[in-house]
Amino acid sequence: MHKAAWVAVAMVLLAAVGIFAARIDWQAESGTQVASSERTQEEATTPEDPSPPRDAAPDAATEVINVVAARAGVPVDGYTAGRPGAPIDSCFPSAAGVTADIVSCGTTAHNADVCWLAPDRVGLLCGTDPWEKELLAYTTAQPVTRAPATSTPRPWALELADGSRCRMRTGGSWPGRADGYVGAYRCTGPTEFVLSKSDAQVDRSTATWTVMTGGLSADNRTLPPPTPITVVTAYFASV
């Protein structure tokens, strides 16, 4: 075969190989694009993992603990008493007492709204909150008359589902908000305040208690609506 013929055959073969390779490359690229498109569509239609619910166990019943921090004027095991403060007076039943003779005395500054009476009914040991184990010691000018338990005691303190610890308001001037809610408990943790529009600060209509939470403002401005959250533990005071 002449040299020119061999050259022509070689050129035909090379062209055929190029077309075949181009077809393979196109199929591979097309397949990759289809696969990528399918993944994109799948990712677009698959919802993101939802955030953990605010209430980790929304159906769990609220635990109620009746704290006894002192008996017969003496701190119980685990509690201590500080040095006596100045005498106070004006005692009445504590809002957190589930039994008689849990009293509230003095002013807001005394932090003596949950107190246990000594047998002489003059000595007082008062708790700042259920987690603080040092009691405040006071005396009264006159023996305290018998103080019956309130008909609808309020929790002294709350532990919420987000881990916040909230202490019952003792009085004083607090910030407000435009929707009429007021601060009922001040909290440490993710929650800042437990809010209320009435004396029913805690919803106890089911075994799992709930409260409304949110912020307060010094200028009573409009704030986001309160958020409900479950109460894990509620603390009261008892003798």
Image: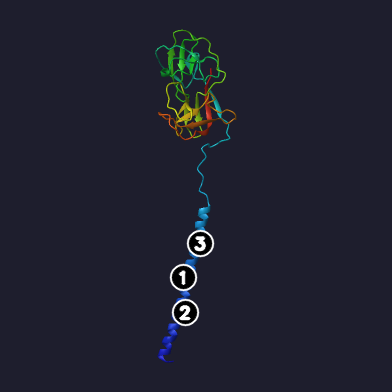
Label disc, if present, on residue 35 of the rendered structure? 3
Label disc, if present, on residue 25 of the rendered structure? 1
Mark 3 residue type: Ala
Mark 1 residue type: Asp
Query: Nearest the camera: 132 or 18?
Result: 18
Is 160 above or below relative to 47?
A: above
Which type of secondary structure does the marked residue at label 1 adopt? helix
Q: Residue at x 48, y 63 (%)?
A: 33
What separation in Å lies between label 1 and label 2 (alpha carbons)? 14 Å
Q: Residue at x 44, y 80 (%)?
A: 15
Q: Residue furthest bottom?
A: 2
Is residue 81 at all visible to an observer of this figure? Answer: no
- Residue 58 is left or right of residue 26, and the answer is right
Residue placed under numbered mark 2 in the picture: 16
Query: Nearest the camera: 196 or 125?
Result: 196
Is 24 above or below relative to 222?
A: below
Are the two marked residues, 1 and 3, in contact with CB atoms closer than 8 angstroms? no
- Residue 123 in the image, given as x and y percentages of width and height: 46, 12
Is 198 above or below relative to 8?
A: above
- Please, which colouring scheme is shown? rainbow
Quarter occupied by residue 187: top left
What separation in Å lies between label 2 and label 3 (alpha carbons)? 29 Å
Q: Please rate how many residues cluster around mark 3, counting C-alpha atoms within 10 Å: few if below 14, some from 14 to 19, many from 20.
A: few
Q: Earlier in the sequence, mark 2 or mark 3?
A: 2
What separation in Å lies between label 1 and label 3 (alpha carbons)? 15 Å
- Residue 233 in the image, given as x and y percentages of width and height: 53, 29
Query: Nearest the camera: 211 or 189?
Result: 211
Is residue 31 at all visible to an observer of this figure? Answer: yes
- Residue 24 in the image, given as x and y percentages of width and height: 48, 71
Mark 2 residue type: Ala
Q: Residue at x 46, y 74 (%)?
A: 21
